[in-house]
Amino acid sequence: NNKVPFSNWNTGILSLQEDLPEDFPKIKVDIVNNPFPGKIVMECFQVSTPEPNYIMISDENGNIEYFHKAQDQGADFKIQPNGRFSYASRVKVGDKYQAGPITVQNIKVQHKILDSDFNTIDSVQMQNELLADMHEFVILPNGNYLALSYEAFPIDMSKLIPNGNPN
């Protein structure tokens, strides 16, 4: 069993702002009213900036216990069912494209897999030029990986329905 219970982590608390890098995102906790004990696994992610983002873990009071400045814009930082951690890292940013009513940023990502000491032990990337989604990467119980991908199939809807959008 590769699971590492959060209670066994020995990361220490980095709760003072001066202990954190100058560009670390400001976290404001408005109310702490008897929170359930545990850890919060999160990231600060922005697609629109070339700046690196942070992946981080805090305690239930918002004290930072672990952080990493992901040079490749870490997103979807989480603990997997087998106890490993993972996050999506940007490999390439392409052009935006229209998908129905939404504009989608074309991002090619790889998912990095970390051990309980937060070392990168593997990475997974879609093949055949498919674009992996930044979310929903899962390590299955049998060790296989499940990842979502996008493949654009533009359809001229004006040929199929009256007043259909050709884009």
Image: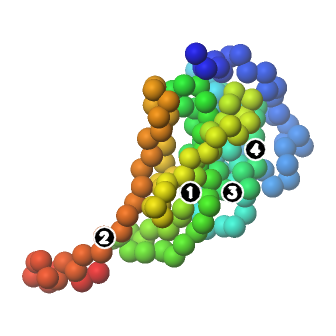
Give the mark nearer the N terminus: 1 vs 4: 4
Q: Mark 4 or 2 closer to N-term? A: 4
Q: Residues within 10 Å of mark 1 (few under 14, many from 20)?
A: many
The disc labelled 1 sits on which kind of residue? Val
Q: Looking at the figure, which quarter contains the C terminus?
A: bottom left
Looking at this view, is 68 or 91 the one in front?
91
Q: Give the Cα separation between the discs numbered 4 and 2.
A: 37 Å
Q: Total label count?
A: 4
Residue picked out by circle 4 = 68
Q: Residue at x 85, y 37 (%)?
A: 16
Label 4 or label 3, whichever lies nearer to me, is 3
Q: Amino acid at mark 4?
A: His
How far from the left and from the top, in percent, is residue 22?
A: 85, 53
User: According to the image, label 3 marks what residue?
Assistant: 72
- Vertically, is 20 above or below 133? above
Q: What is the CA distance from the residue labelled 2 to the residue labelled 1?
A: 20 Å
Q: Position of residue 132 (x, y in %)?
A: 48, 55
Label 2 vs label 3, nearer the camera: 2
Q: Residue furthest left?
A: 162
Q: Earlier in the sequence, mark 2 or mark 3?
A: 3
Circle 2: residue type = Phe
User: Real-space Cα distance between discs 4 and 3?
Assistant: 11 Å
Label 3 amino acid? Asp
Residue 63 rendering spot, x and y as whole percentages? 74, 32
Quadrant position of residue 161: bottom left
Which residue is most to the right? 18
Pointer 4 local density, CA inside 10 Å: few below 14, some 14–19, many at least 20: some
